[in-house]
Image (cartoon, helix red, strand yellow):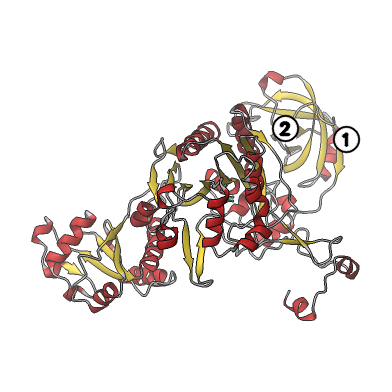
Amino acid sequence: MLKTHSCGELRPSHEGDTVKLAGWVHRRRDHGGLIFIDLRDHDGLTQVVFNPKEAAEAYAVADVSRGEYVLQIEGTVARRPKGTVNPNLPTGEVEVRAHAVTILNEAKTPPFYIVGDSDVDELLRLKYRYLDLRRQRMHETMVMRHRVTKYIRDYLTERGFTEIETPILTAPTPEGARDYVVPSRVHPGRFYALPQSPQQMKQLLMVAGFERYFQIAHCLRDEDLRADRQPEHTQLDLEISFVSDEEDILGLTEELYYDLVQTITPHFKVLSHPFPRMTYEESVRRFGTDKPDLRFGLELVELTEVLRESEFTIFRQAVAQGGVVRAICVPGGAAFSRKQIDELTTFVQGYGAKGLVSLALLGEGGLDSLTQDEIRSPVAKYFTPEQVQVMARLAGANRGDMFLMVADRPDVANKGLDGLRREICRRLDLADPNTLAFAFVIEYPMFKWSETEERWVSSHHPFTSPREEDISLMDSDPGRVRSRAYDLVCNGWELFSGSIRIHRREVQEKVFDMLGIGPEEAQRRFGHMLEAFEYGAPPHAGIGAGIDRLMAILTGQDDIREVIAFPKTKSATDPLTGAPAEVTPEQLAELHIAVTEAEKETS
Ligand code: ASP
């Protein structure tokens, strides 16, 4: 090797040793006759000193070296003089006095600073991702990502799991997104799908008798991109046979996540362990969402009954039409300005809610003495102190607090209040960034009604088992059928989804039927699954867990692009390689594909 030690390795115990280091010029300082270079490699930084009196040739080379030049240095390890020790650097007690230096490669001036964590335009960062990844935060993130996946691999291997790869060129598997497809050259007009997940393969591996499977798998989904979505993401995909109930999976994964955090990021406080379990119904009722951030309160308050006969026409009408009145009660919210309330109203309207009604409780003393004058609201005259007292009791509110109310269809109200809850948390800084609030959400509805497709679709995916006692509801009231799906959520992110699977053919056929997949289509698309279930499929269950999301949480990032080595932009392009790119007419011809002029223009 060109080096005897890494740049993160040297300590006072190496004093007097002759060493060779190789790496990049991180910083170069000229200090009246001496040149100092902080040499950087994968492992860290070491200060190298060039003294023209001790090594004139080396000094001359250091003199012409610039940032990001690649150098090999030979020198002697010395303790740094008193007062120049850097306690923030693991190698901060020593320096290397250079005897010789070789420029292994020169470097152009990078388009942005590698040193520090300055804000750089993202397109530029992605175009020069190999330079961006040199920056300390990115470099550390990638190393930590490796530690996380290694921890998972070791943890599961010790518990009898086998890692098995599944194909990237495969047949479609429905996970609710569009497929990326790959045209077949040898089968004109036919296409492979890139896997939205290894769902079917892992179930088939259970039929194949592996019992405990996992894989760190790439999943590809063509969908609208958001901060927590990329065209391809990495999943911990896991499946177990012979589970008796949900707890078998929840218990295993609870310990995996808990132990992982304790080992890799022990500075986090895990809010509750065991992780709370709550039903989907409870989660939506309390937080308006199935991925609640449990680090702060601001739970939704159900006011529909109290305000059913409200003098306020908008509320009365909304309830009469089957809508709800729900609210968030903000402690100390009476201090919000008119402008802030207007902003929050516009914010909630962005989620489709018609409006937001504020009502603050002013004055001093117990609530029993609340007077009409102490109700501050644009619609205060429609509320009596008695009504407000009931509302306050429901919400546990006091004087100085403020209700923010939405009257709308239940789904719209929930969505708006969920968004509002997170926005208020952001504004009032209510969530501790060093706390992880894990929770399991269970008993998801089996089906949800798709307005656009006018049919029932799976809430999770079609291989999810319904609860045994709800199977009979499938014909009469599909919306009430509960599934055996579960999610792990943390700090408002969905960390994994999974379910107990169907393992009997007739149940699977029934579910396909509910989803509008008739026998012929079921046979054509999923015949292999139906058939496999007839060859002794064991009861089984599993999860697909987002590694990128986990990494974002553990590194305190809002966007998963920050934890992926080579992510795509928000419009699914890769500025580094230029993907997606055009292909040659010869390639298109071979693939039996014609691109129309109109398509070319819009791309
Ligand atoms: N395949 C599912 C997903 O990707 C996870 C699972 O059910 O295991 O969300």
Residue 137 shows in the view: no
Q: What amino acid does circle 2 point to? A: Cys
Q: Position of residue 231 (x, y in %)?
A: 66, 58
Q: Quadrant of the C terminus?
A: bottom right
Mark 1 neighbour class, 10 Å CA radius: few under 14, some 14 to 19, many 20 or more:
some
Residue 375 shows in the view: yes
Above/below status of 330 relative to 130: below
The CA distance from mark 2 to mark 1 is 22 Å
- From the viewer's perspective, tell me whether residue 310 is left or right of residue 475: left
Q: Residue furthest left?
A: 369
Q: Position of residue 377 (x, y in %)?
A: 23, 71
Q: Nearer the viewer, residue 509 or 39?
A: 509
Q: Position of residue 515 (x, y in %)?
A: 54, 62
Q: Nearer the viewer, residue 28 or 149?
A: 149
Mark 2 neighbour class, 10 Å CA radius: few under 14, some 14 to 19, many 20 or more:
many
Q: Nearer the viewer, residue 323 or 484?
A: 484
Residue under the point 56% across and 47% down:
504
- From the viewer's perspective, tell me whether residue 5 is left or right of residue 93: right
Quarter of the image where one finds residue 264: top right
Q: Check whether the beta carbons of the residues at disc 2 and disc 1 lie within 8 A of each other.
A: no
Q: Which residue is mark 1?
A: 57
Dot in front, 2 or 1 = 2
**Which numbered disc, 2 or 1, marks the residue that appears first in the sequence?**
2
Q: Which residue is mark 2?
A: 7
Q: Position of residue 555 (x, y in %)?
A: 55, 44
Q: Secondary structure at mark 1?
A: helix
Q: Secondary structure at mark 2?
A: loop
Q: What amino acid does circle 1 point to? A: Glu
